[in-house]
Image (cartoon, rainbow, N blue to C red):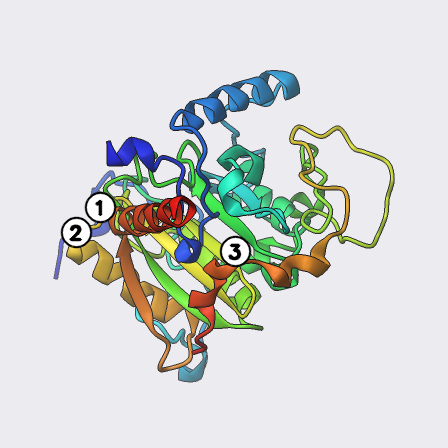
Amino acid sequence: MSAGGQTTTSLEIPAVRRVAIHDAAHMPHEYSTTPGGTLFSTTPGGTRIIYERKFLLQCRTSPLARTPPNNLPDIPGVTRPLNSDSSHDTKNPVEAPTTNNHDTDVQTEEGEDAQFEMDI
Amino acid sequence: MRYAFNESLKDDDSGDHDQDQSSPKDSETIKIEDDEKEQNTTKKKMVVPGAGEHPLQYNYTFWYSRRTPGRPASTQSYEQNIKQIGSFASVEQFWRFYSHMIRPGDLTGHSDFHLFKEGIKPMWEDDANKMGGKWIIRLRKGLASRCWENLILAMLGEQFMVGEEICGAVVSVRFQEDIISIWNKTASDQGTTARIRDTLRRVLNLPPNTIMEYKTHTDSIKYVCLLSLLFSLHLLL
């Protein structure tokens, strides 16, 4: 048994969440994952910031994550749907590459695509 | 010599934009353009996490590229094809971009999303990439959006555990299939590439017999070089 923890001066890793597990089925599937999701947000000493998928997905619904970035370039078909034709241009740091819809002729592209005909 | 000739050339399956025959100083042009953009938009070079947000280990930049239909790839220069969408430093900032972008599976045409660490261009000739390579996975249609999301969440969350090795990830939408790839710095480091492969298997939830291949960027350059040569010969004959 090691010496009592109270005599040391080390600090806890910040922001530890506690999750009660009442059933083995609630344990995570992966070895490296701790109950409740995130494995460890910071490794000791703060060398690496690690997030597990589930935690990242939870952050998606946060109000901070929902506002569109104010510098989002307006690229039809990429940063907005092609058909919703909002004609107002937001301040765009990057020019939209195309404003016309010519997605019908992509299938006529030349030979380079031939190597992709195999399917998995 | 070969290197200069091929600057900005890309092969099709790299999950990268396709190549062009543009001038060797293409990358310089891009650099200048980037600087101008930053001045014009007063966008800071380095984004920082906002208050109360969850910082990421690295900042990342989203890029988008598309080959203009109806024009041969050889006449398009790199900077005509690739656009920066934006950079982020926190989980929340990532979602802000991601939630306002079309899913890869809904992109039209011959398009790529690239997500690279800030400061690394999604080009072979970038210093971080030139000794590197990539794992590529070809996906039948319908899987790209889910696989891309799982891939980038694993990358942002530092699930690969290979130190500084990861450079970025690409999803390429093609006619009959889609391709995702993840790029790392040192192609010769087999421990790293094996670990990346194993992490990919774990996080992507791939069908059991999915084929994964590793390609070094120098091989890709040789391949495109050969194609260019054949193309030139064809023109001459």
Residue in the foreground of this view, choosing between B92 and B197? B197
Which residue is found at the position 71% from the left and 30% from the top? A92
Q: Position of residue B159 (x, y in %)?
A: 36, 56
Tag 2, which secondary structure?
loop
Q: Nearer the viewer, mark 2 or mark 3?
A: 2
Q: Nearer the viewer, mark 3 or mark 1?
A: 1
Kind of residue at badge 1: Thr
Which residue is found at the position 84% from the left and 52% from the top? A84
Task: Say the numbered circle drawn on residue B189.
Answer: 2
Task: Say the numbered circle drawn on residue A56.
Answer: 3
Kind of residue at badge 3: Leu
Q: Is residue B196 above or below residue B74?
A: below
Tag 3, which secondary structure?
helix
In the figure, residue B182 lies in which quadrant? bottom left
Other-residue count near label 3 (Cα within 10 Å), few / some / many at <14 / 14–19 / ≥20: many
Q: Position of residue B209 (x, y in %)?
A: 35, 81
Q: Which residue is mark 1?
A: B186
User: Is any part of residue A36 visible from this angle?
Assistant: no
Which residue is found at the position 87% from the left and 40% from the top? A87
Q: Is residue A105 left or right of residue B228?
A: right
Q: Is residue A85 above or below residue B210?
A: above
Residue in the foreground of this view, choosing between A60 and B113? B113
